[in-house]
Image: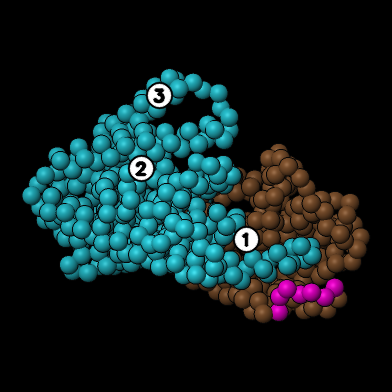
Amino acid sequence: MDDRSTDSDRGTDGERSILDTLGEDIIRIVTPVSLCMLLVVLLVSSLSSTNDLSSSISSLFLSSQPSSLSSPNLLGSDSTWEEIKSALITAFSFVVVVTLLTFLLVLLVYFRCTNFLRIYMGISSLFVLSFLGGFISLLLISYFKIPIDPFTFAILLFNLSVIGVFAVYMSKFPISMNQGYLVTIGVLTAYWFTMLPEWTTWALLIAMSLYDLAAVLLPIGPLRLLVELAMSRNEEIPALVYEARPVDPQPGDRIRVWRERTDVRIDATENSTNLANVQPVRETRLVVSEEITAPLIETFPQTSDRQLGSEEEEGEGIGLSLSGAIKLGLGDFIFYSVLVGRAAMYDYMTVYACYLAIIAGLGVTLMLLAVYRQALPALPVSIMLGVVFYLLTRVLLEVFVVQCSSNLLMF
Amino acid sequence: MTVAAGLGYVLIALGPALSLFASVIAKKPFLILTLLSSTLFWLISLIILAGAWRSFLPVKSTELWPYSILILTSVGFQEGIRIVFWRLFKKMEDMLNAFADRVSKPRLFLTDKMLLALAGGLGHALAHAVFFCLSLLTPAFGPATFYVDKCSNIPFFLISAIIALGFVIIHTFSMVIAFNGYNEGKRSDQIFVPFAHLIAALITLINLVPGGCNIGLPLLCIMAGTTLYYSWRLVWRRLTEHQTTRSSD
């Protein structure tokens, strides 16, 4: 199979091949996801050694579970079963709460209370940035022994949080600040979630991915209703969404294909004794405009749906780098990072395996989107692949690799 | 031995790979995607191998033969999977060419194909280095170091970093050689790659003998150099041939 005959005549060195620009948009979305995961892994691995504050928070979560775990169990197998039971109950109640709140969101959007939603989400991101950010900064300061006085810290925190809220919600801000603050919010929330006990985290991840699958694909699913509402009204719902490229949404845009997710965070304050005290904090969405095609699928974007970004070259026909940008909801960032952070608490080998699995799942989801051209959930494929790879690595690969490497045998 | 030493070991194992990545692969997004999928593919091959060997591990004996069977089966499996990898690659090339035709851009050049092969090989190398070396380097960032009995004059981390470096070079460039060999149908290239892989893996068997790593490590580096030289000669020959055929049209 001599491939000399298939080489086209290469002109001057300036001629570009398709390899130069293909896949640009996927990389633009993979990079911030990877960065978020890296920061969460670094936080987890450096802060897990300072056990006083974070372990007290963990025990807070444990004591707030509706089960009899407040007294330490002396029988090993019993406590595992108890943990699994409480984890399942926690995950189930979380999913129920998320479903109810998403339906509430659908109602609010139906009655056109978008202003209320905007203000609410502004307050919730302020909360995340200032309280969670302050808490984690305090942990970092105590771990790295950074000399800083309370007043400077308070001023810095206040300023950074307020700018963060503006950066996330006002479209006139530079896009890099917007992206940076979204990644920060994702990192903070994901780190908070990794403080949950182990079985609870895994049960929660699996439950949320199943919920995502059901909510987007079933006809009565709340996210699908939201998608149809937004499409029928042709308007943008306020959300925390990461845009891979600067896009100016204008009122008349025909954005067809949406993927949406709603995320709710459990707010466990000192006074909460059970999980009924939850607060809907933030909604996130994954929105993909129709022009996105994966490079290996032969669907060609329709030129009629091009957005009004005039800086884009209309003649350039390469699939992913058209004017439509990929947008990924912040909840997806958060749950990917939670999975990787939890893998980091075991060993770095699981981190690498889960990272590859999640990126593969993200790629598969994007390609499925290009093929099916309808609203698709972003969580299930990645989380399922991540969990499978975590189990396989922990059970199979680690023993094999340690056996080989400790004898200095490699292949 | 502190963060500096840990970082040093990481850079020993992955330095060339990192510079290859930064200078060649990071410029074209599609190559990054190829790298990631290739790493995933070879990770899956490692997991399958680990699954197949799970019931026989941990090998408690200090005899040579269980380990040699381990090495032989693993290398054989990986070389077999390489052919599967090549077939997937050909399919991807066909899809890319069809896409290029549709958007009326030129089809894949020879250098493009070689770059894709390089990215695939680097993915294999990364999978090896990350899982055999990096994941065990976590204690190296702490305050102490570790020595193995059989090789007590060099820290364990340094040995595994150097072995990983050798294998990074071998894997990256043998993928280039292998793809060229399969494309052209040249027997010598096709035989060279499994052969080199096998010899390199068998060299690490020398490490089982006490004091063997003093011989094993240099031999491995020689093997890596051989692969590098072979791949360089191959690429040079192909590029000059391609140049002359084009200019003679």
Against A342, is A118 above or below? above
Q: Amino acid at mark 2?
A: Glu
Q: Position of residue B240 (x, y in %)?
A: 67, 56
| Residue for point 16% across, 54% down | A104
Residue B175 vs residue A124: left or right?
A: right
Q: Pointers 1 and 2 in contact (CB under 8 A)?
A: no
Name the spot of residue A215 as percent of width and height, x first.
25, 64
Work out which quarter of the rendered image holds the C terminus of chain B and state it. Answer: bottom right
Chain letter for the part of the structure drawn in cyan:
A
State the brown chain. Answer: B
Query: Relative to A53, is B120 on the left or the right?
Result: right
Q: Chain of mark 2?
A: A
Q: Is residue B61 rendered magenta in the image?
A: yes
Q: Given this view, does label 2 or label 3 mark the residue nearer the observer? A: 2
The nearer-to-camera label among 1 and 2 is 2
Depth check, front residue: A192 or B134: A192
Name the foreground residue: B193 vs B142: B142
Question: How far, Cα to Cα, is label 2 from label 3?
Answer: 22 Å
Residue placed under numbered mark 1 in the picture:
B127
Residue for badge 3 = A154
User: Which residues, given as a range, are shown in magenta?
Assistant: B56-62
Q: Which residue is mark 2?
A: A270
Amino acid type, mark 3: Ala
